[in-house]
């Protein structure tokens, strides 16, 4: 996947989440460590893996995963929630 931040978007069905994207935290670090206890996307810059963690630092809660072939730059602006028709 040749994902490019600012050009490509990753879309998630909003019905799968209990929060709006605006109120969702985005965290990116080398350990894939969540920050705080709110639902959040966490990008692990070492494993190139993006996960959704519904309870942040709470145990478990990871429900979706995308593994990129190579390291990418990704921000919350690269994510969108959509409503299925
Ligand atoms: Ca968690």
Image (cartoon, rainbow, N blue to C red):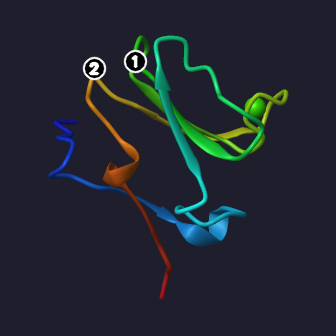
Q: Is residue 56 above or below residue 31?
A: below
Q: Position of residue 85 (x, y in %)?
A: 48, 88
Residue 52 falls in which quadrant of the image?
Answer: top right
Query: Residue most toward the right?
Result: 59
* Residue wearing tag 1: 45
The percent coordinates of residue 40 (x first, y second) are 62, 43
> How many residues crowd mark 1 within 10 Å: few (<14), some (14–19), many (20+)?
some
Dot 1: what SS? loop
Label pair 2/1, CB-CB below 8 angstroms: yes
Q: CA distance from mark 2 to mark 1?
A: 6 Å
Where residue 65 appears, as percent x and y from the top left, is 53, 37
Task: Choose between 66 and 75: the one closer to the eye.
Answer: 75
Position above or below: 35 against 46 = below
In the drawing, what numbered circle is on residue 83?
A: none
For the point 41% across and 11% down, the residue is 46
Q: Is residue 84 left or right of residue 38?
A: left
Q: Which residue is mark 2?
A: 71
Q: Is residue 65 above or below residue 80?
A: above
């Amino acid at each position: 996947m040749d994902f490019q931040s600012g050009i490509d978007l990753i879309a998630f069905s909003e019905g799968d989440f209990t929060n709006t994207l605006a109120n969702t935290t985005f965290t990116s670090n080398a350990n894939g460590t969540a920050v705080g206890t709110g639902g959040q996307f966490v990008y692990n810059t070492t494993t190139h893996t993006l996960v959704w963690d519904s309870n942040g630092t709470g145990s478990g809660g990871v429900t979706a995963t995308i593994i990129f072939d190579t390291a990418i730059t990704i921000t919350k602006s690269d994510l969108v929630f959509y409503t299925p028709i």
